[in-house]
Image (cartoon, helix red, strand yellow):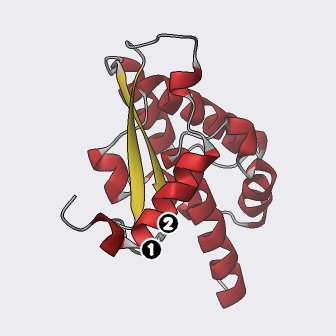
Amino acid sequence: MAPEENAGSELLLQSFKRRFLAARALRSFPWQSLEAKLRDSSDSELLWDILQKHPVCVKHTPSVKYARCFLSVLIKKHEAVHTEPLDELYEALVETLMAKESTQGHRSYLLNLLNPGGGVTLSKSTAIISHGITVLVTWDATLYLAEWAIKNPAAFTDR
């Protein structure tokens, strides 16, 4: 793979990982770019890389329901380009179909992909719904505050 193609694949991979860990709406993923890469490349290395768990995901997994939906769309996109089936995609889907749904889900916002500790993970419980559904929303102000806190650790010393 040419260096510029490799850089493009790496950016696409990081975009997928950031969105997945933050449990972003599936429509926000760069699906068209993924399909174009899959059409241009006969190997499925990019899909394999997308399936690899980020260190944050191992510790703080998104909800099982979200993972199922994500894998279903990923499989549809893969099948749409008529490439060789990737068994690992189907194995990952089967694993999530067999997984027990938890009342806990996590959203991780990575501020620096190279430093897994350079982000914020929010734990969300779907069992504690009160006063409407706003408790399940991550407000932009929360993310801005988290970024500021990471840049200004002295403000939180001894607190």
Q: Residue at x 46, y 30 (%)?
A: 93
Front-most of 140 and 96? 140
Q: Are marks 2 and 1 in contact (CB under 8 Å)?
A: yes
Three-letter amino acid code of the residue under disc 2: Trp
Quarter of the figure with residue 3: bottom right
> Where residue 30 sits in the image (x, y, percent)?
74, 53
In the picture, the disc for residue 151 is: 1
Outermost residue toward the bottom in this view: 3
Which quarter of the rendered picture does the C terminus lie within?
bottom left
Front-most of 88 and 5? 5
- Tell me if residue 43 can be seen: no
How many numbered discs, if any? Answer: 2
Front-most of 38 and 107? 107
Three-letter amino acid code of the residue under disc 1: Lys
Which quarter of the rendered picture does the N terminus lie within?
bottom right
> Where residue 125 sits in the image (x, y, percent)?
38, 22
In the picture, the disc for residue 80 is: none
Residue carrying label 2: 148
Q: Is residue 88 left or right of 36 when viewed as pictured? A: left
Instruction: Look at the picture and state if 27 lies above or below 46.
Output: above
> Where residue 85 sits in the image (x, y, percent)?
59, 43
- Tell me if residue 46 can be seen: yes
Decide: few, some or many residues near mark 2? Use Cα within 10 Å; few <14, some 14-19, many ≥20: few
Q: CA distance from mark 2 to mark 1?
A: 5 Å
